[in-house]
Image (tube, rainbow, N blue to C red):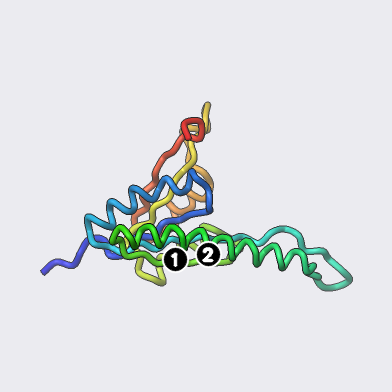
Amino acid sequence: MREPLLRKILVSLDGSVLAELALPHAKALAQKFDARLILLWVIEPMPLILPVMDYAVVPDEYVELSNRLEEQAERYLSRLCKSLLEQDVATNVLVIRSDSVTDAIVDFAEQEGVDLIVKTDYGRSGISRWVFSSITCKLLEQASCPVFIVKVNQANN
């Protein structure tokens, strides 16, 4: 008996409507292959560390804002997860803090044996419409599994 082609599908989200446009594609693949979706939001640190003497001080407001962002991300992903579970799509959610969105996605995908990464790439106009975003380019170069890019146009959404 052959093992399923797709068992784990990672969807990279950031809370935006445009990023969420990857979900219908990922959901369709998950249903077709009876795969599990992993909804991942990578939070990059906010550049607000103030140097004081020989070490950095992180203001309480910065820590509070960072924690609120993580809580917001967890609530957002939980809401999406609940909706997908109601549609009989096995789903997990994860929020990661990392200095690099791309590295976090690639590392997680390798550690967890992800079979496919699904991500949107936001449309542009002019010459830049022929190029992918830097995160998308890095994912295409660095990921050890296939990457499914959902091209969306900001003007139409």
Q: Residue furthest right?
A: 53
- The residue sitting at 41% across, 56% down in the picture is 11
Q: Amino acid at mark 1?
A: Val
Query: Left or right: 141 with respect to 116?
Result: right
- The residue sitting at 38% across, 51% down in the picture is 23
Q: Position of residue 63 (x, y in %)?
A: 72, 68
- Which residue occupies the foreground of this view, 157 or 87? 87
- The residue sitting at 61% across, 60% down in the picture is 44
Image: 18 above or below 42: above
Categorize mark 1 by other alpha carbons within 10 Å: few (<14), some (14-19), many (20+): many
Q: CA distance from mark 1 to mark 2?
A: 8 Å
Image: 132 above or below 71: above
Q: Residue furthest top?
A: 126
Q: Amino acid at mark 2?
A: Glu
Q: Position of residue 109 (x, y in %)?
A: 41, 65
Say which residue label 1 marks: 93
Q: Where does the N terminus fall, quadrant-wise?
A: bottom left
Q: Position of residue 133 (x, y in %)?
A: 51, 44
Verify CB contact (< 8 Å) between mark 1 and mark 2: yes
- The residue sitting at 48% across, 32% down in the picture is 129
Q: Which mark is residue 46?
A: none
Query: Left or right: 97 with respect to 85?
Result: right
Query: Left or right: 3 with respect to 90?
Result: left
Say which residue label 2 marks: 74
Categorize mark 2 by other alpha carbons within 10 Å: few (<14), some (14-19), many (20+): some
- Which residue occupies the foreground of this view, 7 or 16? 16
The kind of secondary structure element at disc 1 is strand
Q: Say which label, 1 or 2, has the lower sequence index.
A: 2
Q: Position of residue 32 (x, y in %)?
A: 22, 55
The kind of secondary structure element at disc 2 is helix
Total marks placed: 2
Where, by quadrant of the figure, is residue 84 drawn? bottom left
